[in-house]
Image (spheres, rainbow, N blue to C red):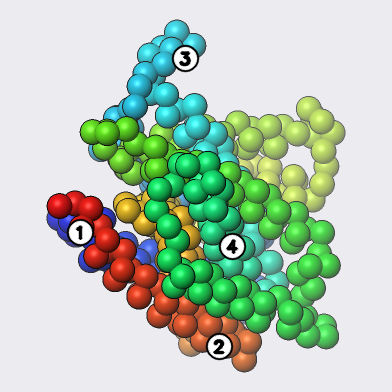
Amino acid sequence: MFYKTEEGSTRQLIEFCTGYFLLYTITGLTVKYFTGDSAMGYPGLSDIQYLVYNTIGGNLIALVIVLAFKWYKLQTNNYISLIGFKVPSEFLYIIPSGICTAIVIPTTTLMYTLPISVMVAMVIMRGSIIVISRLIDAVQIWQGILKKRVYWEENAAVVFAIFAVLANLLNVKPGSFDFVGSPAAMTILICYLVAYSIRIYIMNYYKNTRAKGIKQDNKAFFAVEQIAATFTMLLIGIFIYNSESIAGWTAPQILQFRESFAAPHSFWFWAGVSGFAFGLLAFFSVFLFMFKGRTATFAGLVNRLTSLIAGTAATLLFALIWGGEYPEAEDWITLGFILIAVAFLSKAEKKRSAELKIESK
């Protein structure tokens, strides 16, 4: 569908958001379903088991697509010699972006497996990235890489996105999961944020440094990044599997990781299939982050806010279908702030579209 739409148009933006929303809703549902208590009729996979099977499924579908369609053929500003091969110079930073992706993928899934609602998990991750996207614009404007200005409507949307994060982070009830006080949760979040910050900077560096006549090929960027991410995760997986003999690691999570392969759960195949949605939404995620003619602030807001709304949909559907908990008051307050942010973004998009039309003449 979106291949026939004018590149960089508002219509294409809406199409990407629609695909991203639907796939993220499915992802939010499946993670809670497969890791639900077996005594209540759910498959009962452990967090690590689901992480393993879901990640394999997601990476497999993404890798098959980029290889089958040969998206990895990148138009380059110039070629360089690397290990005796002539390769695009962009590989020097796209490959590190793929390594960061290898960190983002499992930490994203791990965030969903924490004892918090899908909505809260998405608010924490997405809200943080919204702020980082705005900072990256500031840095790249200062560096002279980004030639566009950030509209005041985009800044206003960032403010309301921050309010959305605070609505959940500051409302910790007695007996509820203490996210900030959990070493595991904070470690996952920090790894996620650092890796994603580097990755978003690289994506915008690529987008903003295309030489005259050189196409901004988001599909090629995604392909090279995905190949690097898959190879990195494969190496990490092999190390973790053998970590007891190599480094003497015997943590419960390590043992569960090995058990996932040595004694697969009866639902391993379907958990892997559930990863297809996560693998497919990765395409939409990158295409939104790198959307043509938009700032990192705008693209980051559109990307993250879409997934936040999907979080509400996933929580509601899980409650209606499988009897899970309904969104709480702070979740609805968060959604209200998100909708206000979306209203500001709509105004910014109208201004940017008009600006791009003038530039194209």
For residue 121, above or below residue 211? below
Residue bearing the label numbered 4: 131
For label 1, the SS is helix
Residues 108 and 125: in front is: 125
Q: Would you call the spot at circle 1 few (<14 residues within 10 Å), some (14-19), or many (20 or more)? A: few
Determine if residue 23 is in view.
Answer: no
Q: Nearer the viewer, mark 4 or mark 1?
A: 1
Residue bearing the label numbered 2: 332
Residue bearing the label numbered 1: 357
Residues 121 and 193: in front is: 193
Residue at image location 65% in from the left, 81% down from the top? 167
Sequence-first disc among 1 and 2: 2
Residue bearing the label numbered 3: 82
**Where residue 42 appears, x then y in whole percent?**
57, 72
Q: Residue furthest bottom?
A: 329
For residue 301, above or below residue 197? below
For label 2, the SS is helix
Inter-mark Cα distance, 4 to 1: 28 Å
Residue type indicated by callout 3: Leu
Residue at image location 79% in from the left, 50% down from the top? 252
Inter-mark Cα distance, 1 to 2: 37 Å
Contact, CB < 8 Å: mark 4 with mark 3? no
Sequence-first disc among 3 and 1: 3
Residues 34 and 344: in front is: 344
**Where residue 96 appears, x then y in whole percent?**
54, 34
On-image quarter of the N terminus: bottom left
Residue at image location 57% in from the left, 74% down from the top? 159
Residue type indicated by callout 2: Trp
Inter-mark Cα distance, 2 to 3: 52 Å
